[in-house]
Amino acid sequence: MQVVDQVISERLTSDVPLVKEVSQYIISAGGKRLRPALLLLVSGALESLHPHRHTLAAVVEFIHTATLLHDDVVDESTLRRGRATANERFGNAPSVLVGDFLYSRAFQMMVDVNNMRVMQVLSDATNVIAEGEVQQLVNMHDPSLDEAAYLRVIRSKTAKLFEASARLAPILCGAPTDVEQTCATYGQALGTAFQVIDDVLDYEGSANVLGKNLGDDLREGKVTLPIICALKKASASQQALLRDAIVDGDLEHMDDILQVIRETGALEAARASAYGEAQRAMKAAERLPANHYSSALLQLAADLLERRS
């Protein structure tokens, strides 16, 4: 990961000072670097030391960071990772344009790798992510959204880049198709579980721990799994409260909404869904060669369920 951070630093160069300033602001915020770490762990599990693995790990982090810059503008977010979002600090226009810069820099780096299959996987992933973001926008403020529709969105906008990150390692080392699919399954399941837990934390965490504002999803009109689960078991009056909040994006009755979510067992139900995805990831990891890297992939999926930030 130190090598990946070095690649990131080297490739953030630009003759335009604002590009470098905004890029470094969002990249230096830290974050989990989960997607590049996933690519490196899968490479290790496959006993591959391909020289391009660090470049592609930086590529997936650039793609992820570009989506964050754009998402925060769309969502009008003001807080991420415990500090002001780039759009809050620099404005919407610089955030969108620097997001574009990071996307294009990522594709320049893909070309350097000179592997058409790599290009196909990452270009397909970025396209699916964009579709998922648009579909989420369409779904905003819709209280009739069901779990299947919710899962389709998060498997596009979040899990797809996890899947691509895990798929790149076997592509680089020329692993058989079934091994590539096993890695892709692990990545998709892990990414799905990650997003479900993220959505749970929006209702049970705190701003200080999460690094973002509690209830942001509801304020933005996003119908996530905890709300969907709560609507299934809520009384008629409780359903009316939740639906009004979804439609209006009004957090005036947030304390009452949190009580409904707790009383209906919605958080437990959502975590159970995440548990199922984590189990699917672990089963895929068990099909990889047995070494300390594949053991780490198993542990990563298990630890995800204990995530609190």
Image (cartoon, rainbow, N blue to C red):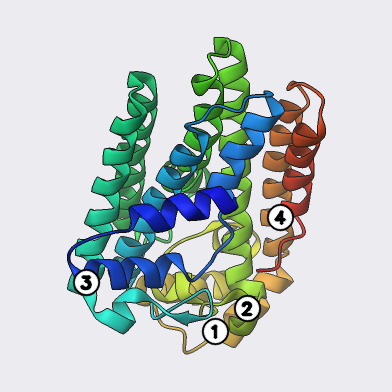
Q: Are the two marked residues, 1 and 3, in contact with CB atoms closer than 8 angstroms?
A: no
Classify mark 2: residues with Cα within 10 Å, few (<14), some (14-19) or many (20+).
some
Q: Residue at x 73, y 44 (%)?
A: 301
Please tell me how many numbered marks the rendered image carries: 4
C-alpha distance separating marks 2 and 1: 6 Å
The label nearer to you, 3 versus 2, is 3
Q: In which quarter of the image is the C terminus?
A: bottom right
The spot of residue 86 in percent (x, y) is: 34, 75
Question: Which label belongs to residue 258?
Answer: 2
Classify mark 4: residues with Cα within 10 Å, few (<14), some (14-19) or many (20+).
many
Residue matched to label 4: 271
Q: Residue at x 47, y 89 (%)?
A: 252
The spot of residue 305 in percent (x, y) is: 74, 54
Kind of element beneath mark 1: helix
Residue matched to label 3: 17
The label nearer to you, 3 versus 4, is 3
Question: With 108 as the anchor, is 281 left or right in this view?
Answer: right
C-alpha distance separating marks 3 and 2: 44 Å
Residue matched to label 1: 254
Q: Are the two marked residues, 2 and 1, in contact with CB atoms closer than 8 angstroms?
A: yes
The label nearer to you, 4 versus 2, is 4
Judging depth in this view, the residue of 140 and 133 nearest the camera is 133
Judging depth in this view, the residue of 263 and 46 nearest the camera is 46
- In the figure, 54 relative to 268: above or below? above
Judging depth in this view, the residue of 36 and 218 nearest the camera is 36
| Between discs 3 and 4, the one toward the N terminus | 3
Q: Which residue is drawn at 68% across and 47% down?
A: 273
